[in-house]
Amino acid sequence: MTDTVTMAHGSGGSATKELIENVFAAEFSNDTLNAMEDSAVVPASEKIALTTDSFVVKPVEYKGGNIGRLSICGTVNDLLMRGSKPEYITAGFILEEGLDIDLLKRIVKSAAETAREAGVRIVAGDTKVIDGNGGIYINTAGVGLLDPAAEDISAKRASDGDVIIVSGNLGDHHSAILTDRLGIDSDIESDNAPLVDIVGNLLKSGVEIHTLRDITRGGLATVLKELAESSGTCFYINENDIPASAAVKSFAAMLGLEPLYMGNEGKLAAVVAAKDVERALEIIRNSKYGADAVIVGEVKAEESRRGRLIVRTEIGSEREVGILKGEGLPRIC
């Protein structure tokens, strides 16, 4: 096998077979995938959640992860946000000619390890090789089985008196990507992680969850603004309570960024009934990847402020914020 991907690896012939067997099947092996049929047949007699996403992040390896881990986390977390249990994933790899085979193996291995951590199976996949300069892009699709107790979890359900919890510090993934691209020496690592434990523990507890949303591109501000618009409520958050590490705050201040708008790949916002908020906070803090969870604000049904996001500032004033404008540089997923 060559050291880099060549156009022959996308020909459908012996080089393609060699690539699939030595790189993908070696890591993604399971009974369904190993059958190598044109499509996977899997059991499902319940309501299912479906999602798909594409990952084009650069660099493809960064502190704390790579595009392989990211692609699994992104799809798993999207399924979790509707209260479903992620079960199956498909993975399509678009490889540019010249891609280093050892790099590809590391990415595929990371994707396989993350899938096992999340408890999902990669049951179908595809590879295409195109002209280029050694890049790699991944498309994933996922299927989750809907928990009957979670069918009502929706962006529309946030309501008067609800409390907003954020599962941890913001901006780690954005900072990790940006420091790498700028050549800045930093210890900040990406937070990319599957949030299976947090959501699973919340659902098992019976906490009244109205809305879940993972905080990715556009950051917390964009997510909460969209939730306020979907539910026809006003979201209030407290500037002092927005969580970010000292390193991220310093980095953001240096570049004129706001953690409120910085992207993440392992954080969620949970909107829960006020009566359950302390229990929900404890559950999240005791779950994997939720130790730094905090309450950041509340939801109000104010007719004159429907669809708005208001930040209560450190000096006691209020400022309205909107969704991220323009391009969120760099591409973080």
Image (tube, grey):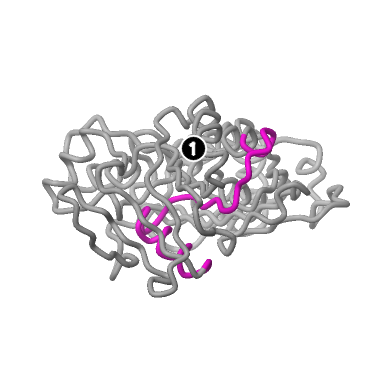
Q: Label 1: state its secondary structure.
A: loop
Name the side, left or right, on which 30 lies relative to 306: right
Image quarter of the N terminus: top right
Number of labels in the image equals: 1
**Looking at the image, which is closer to me, 144 or 3?**
144
Whether 76 is among the magenta residues is: no
Residue farthest top in this picture: 286
**Residue receiving disc 1:** 193
Tell me: 199 left or right of 88: left
Q: Give residue 211's position: percent from left, percent from top.
A: 56, 53
Indicate left or right for 313 with 41 as reference. left
Label 1 neighbourhood size at 10 Å, few (<14), some (14-19), many (20+)?
many
Above-or-below relation of 132 to 42:
below
Q: How far from the left and from the top, in percent, is residue 186?
A: 20, 33
What residue type is disc 1 on? Answer: Ala
Residue 123 location (% of width, % of height): 73, 46
For image coordinates 14% across by 46% down, the residue present is: 253
Residue at image location 11% in from the left, 46% down from the top: 254
Viewed as shown, does residue 17 lie left or right of 133? Answer: right
User: Which residues are drawn in magenta?
Assistant: 202-231
Residue at 37% in and 45% down: 296
Comparing 276 with 172, the one in front is 276
Between 247 and 164, the residue placed more toward the observer is: 164
Q: Is residue 228 magenta?
A: yes
Residue plotted at (65% across, 36% down): 200
Q: Residue furthest bottom?
A: 304
